[in-house]
Amino acid sequence: MDLRELQLFLHLCNTLHFGKTSREHHLSPSSLTRVIKKLEENVGLPLFERDSRLVKLTPAGLLFREYSAEALQRWSDLQRELRQRSDRLVGTLSIFCSVTASYSFLHELLDQFRSSNPAVDIQLRTGDTALTIQRVLDDHEDVGIAALPDVLPDKLVFRTIRESRLVFIAPKSQSILREQLNGYIHSGLELPWEQIPLVLSETGLARGRVDDWFMNKGIRPQVYAQVAGNEAIVSMVSLGFGVGVVPELVVENSPMRARIDVLYVQPELAPISIGVCILKRKLSNPLIRAFWDMSGEHALASHTAASPHV
């Protein structure tokens, strides 16, 4: 067995989906099946139970997953030791963040990191920010740009880059919803929330806070849609489908910002802290440590909280 086979096996352990792993590694499902069959022959036991609907690890698969992760980590450690004679860092750094983070402050972070570490290959994946913490915990990525959760898992360190308010947003365009809102927006009166369609995140910190906000008011909201990603919320709101809740940072960087209004509500939703999260054990990796240390310099330069939550 080789490193490539172990990498494919571990990826399949995370996705439990032959199609997804095949697509992300640019090979056919039949080629992936042959790799897994070869590993199972070497191990002498099935690693996965699979049928037309379900893929799951066998007990042997669970043990082999631990072995594979340790083998790849040891290989990475060996490569690092062999490169210690070099004055520059080399290797791959994987980052997960939302689209908004990628074109707001991540540009500055990467510009600074690349100028000091030109030999490092950076792999960026974007998606719903609510998924970031779990993706880092599951070791899918080395670094995540995320909102600080109310309870940070013990395995993680987090460094705040900036703060952002959570705001209610409404469409500016003429629509039935806008006509409904016009009588309230500038009056200071409480909106008739039970009659207003809402577009909210499926999960995550913002969803939890807005749910608590309505519960504290004794209001049962009318949820029109639950979507993945703040950018999708802004888009649907701008089209007149409902009122949404997103970080103000998203509004500031959205191409739809001229088509939405920020609503005044009382009490305001608590702001969120957005920053860098990394597994504690990975700080022993010089490459990841370099990014972590540089993020602290960036946080200080941005006049935000720079001390990590450990």
Image (spheres, rainbow, N blue to C red):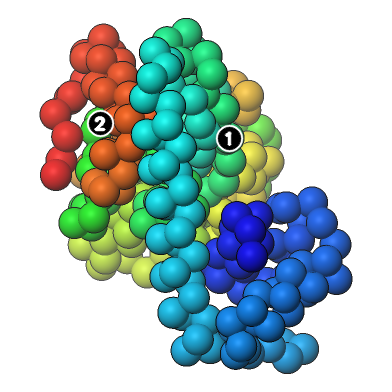
**Residue placed most toward the observer, 240 or 115:** 115
Dot 2 falls on a residue whose secondary structure is strand
Where is residue 242 shown, x and y percent of the image? 57, 50
Residue 279 shown left or right of residue 177 in the figure: left
Quadrant position of residue 103: top right
Image quadrant containing the C terminus: top left
Mark toward the viewer: 2 or 1: 1
Residue 157 on image: x %, y % = 23, 43
Determine if residue 138 is in view: no
Question: Distance between the Cα atoms at labels 2 and 1?
Answer: 22 Å
Would you name the residue on which mark 1 appears?
A: 123
Q: Quadrant of the N terminus?
A: bottom right
Q: Are marks 2 and 1 in contact (CB under 8 Å)?
A: no
Query: Is 118 left, or right, of 44 in this rendering?
Result: left
Q: Badge 2, how many Cα within 10 Å: few under 14, some, many 20+?
A: many
| 158 is higher (above) or lower (below) than 279 | above
Disc 1 marks a residue whose amino acid type is Gln
Q: In the picture provided, is 219 more to the left or to the right than 12?
A: left
Q: Residue at x 24, y 46 (%)?
A: 280
Residue type, mark 2 in image: Thr
Q: Position of residue 65 (x, y in %)?
A: 48, 71
Residue 176, placed above or below residue 253: below
Rendered image: mark on residue 160: 2
Instruction: Judge the density around disc 1: few (<14), some (14-19), many (≥20) Cα neighbours within 10 Å.
Output: few
Work out whether residue 35 can be spotted. Answer: yes
Instruction: Please give the name of the residue rendered at 59% of the width and 82% of the height, measured from the top-left corner.
Output: 43
User: Regarding mark 1 in the picture, which secondary structure is present there?
Assistant: strand
Q: Name the residue at 73% across, 79% down.
A: 37
Count of marks placed on residues: 2
The image quarter in which residue 282 lies: top left
Image location (x, y in percent) of residue 59? 47, 89
